[in-house]
Image (spheres, rainbow, N blue to C red):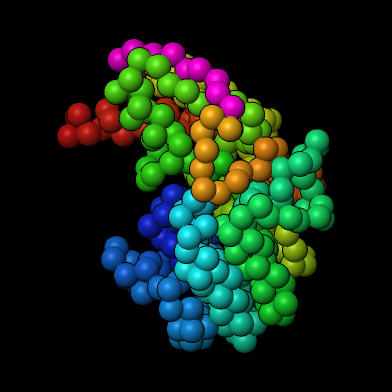
Amino acid sequence: MKLLLLGGNGQVGRELRRVLPALGDVVVGTRDGADADVVADFDAPEALAGLVHRIAPDVVVNAAAYTAVDRAEGEPVAAFRANAEAPSALARGCAGTGALLVHYSTDYVFDGSGVRPYREDDATAPLGVYGASKLAGEYAIRASGARHAILRTAWVYAAHGRNFLHTMLRLASERDELGVVADQIGAPTPAAWIADATGQLLRHGLATSGTWHLVAAGETCWHGFADAIMDEALAAGLLPRRPRVLPIATVDYPTPARRPGYSVLDTTKLQRDFGIVPPDWRDGLRATLHGMEQDRGDMAAG
């Protein structure tokens, strides 16, 4: 199998670099070509269909996106270019070559007013530019005629990169007390597991194109996630002390973009179609921190 991985330097992309080589030859694309095989600039989507034709992969895995949720409110053209126009161009390339397109989307396509985990066929109603741009990308892929798997995920974090986990660890080293939003509910999902599940999906194969939800099991709020980070990081020796984590309301932490209040995603379809069983979100956190602890030990030994 020949695979083209786009967004190879992002949170999920870096984990896919670990997973995908077991499936075949991997060509990695990044925005500027750094630490990669090819340039895949999502600010120039018109070149992406040609890239797919030139590489002629069996599978395109698109882990690239514009993910600055708040900045997107002031940069809608840039957000739609990367999240809608670029996936549309990739999908056209895949339709023309017969390649399968694996594309990651988001819980932000929903408005968060639900009272049970969202299913794939529930009505979408994004609250802001980021969610609207990702939803437009979904529509474009489905309309392209390309074979595709759209994987919606949420609350993604990793042992590397800029994310909630690293922000909490940094603030914990600087402060004795943190205030964290407690009225937004979701499922923290590690990038490493997203990559592992993607590999499992590709090994299984797709009987038909579709959309699946790909998130960890269970649910918590950002305050609960932060509290768990402090407990587990302290136990792993990644923090010298544990700060207090206080719950606050969304209204007390205003942001340019509105967030869904409830964005838990139902993974029943994923489990049924591919036999992929998501880990509990806390187990995923523990595994991620354990990896960080090992990396720190390796660096000290080196």
The image quarter in which residue 134 lies: bottom right
Residue 283, percent across and down?
56, 27
- Identity of the residue drawn at 49% across and 51% down: 70
Residue 140 seen in the figure: yes
Name the foreground residue: 216 vs 182.
Answer: 182
Is 241 within the magenta?
A: yes
Residue 282 seen in the figure: no
Name the foreground residue: 44 vs 285.
Answer: 44
- Location of residue 241 with respect to 216 vertically, above or below: above
The image quarter in which residue 241 lies: top left
- Identity of the residue drawn at 48% across and 84% down: 46
* Number of numbered discs overlaid on the protein picture: 0
Residue 172, percent across and down?
36, 22
Quadrant of the snapshot with the C terminus? top left
Residue 188, percent across and down?
57, 36
- Identity of the residue drawn at 50% across and 70% down: 77
- Location of residue 207 with respect to 166 vertically, above or below: below
Name the foreground residue: 170 vs 182.
Answer: 182
Q: Magenta part of the protein: which range?
A: 238-250
Quadrant of the snapshot with the N terminus? bottom right
- Identity of the residue drawn at 66% across and 52% down: 127
- Asked if residue 40 lies left or right of residue 63, the reply is left
- Location of residue 81 with respect to 262 vertically, above or below: below
Is 233 within the magenta?
A: no
- Asked if residue 77 lies left or right of residue 150, the reply is left
- Location of residue 269 with respect to 229 vertically, above or below: below
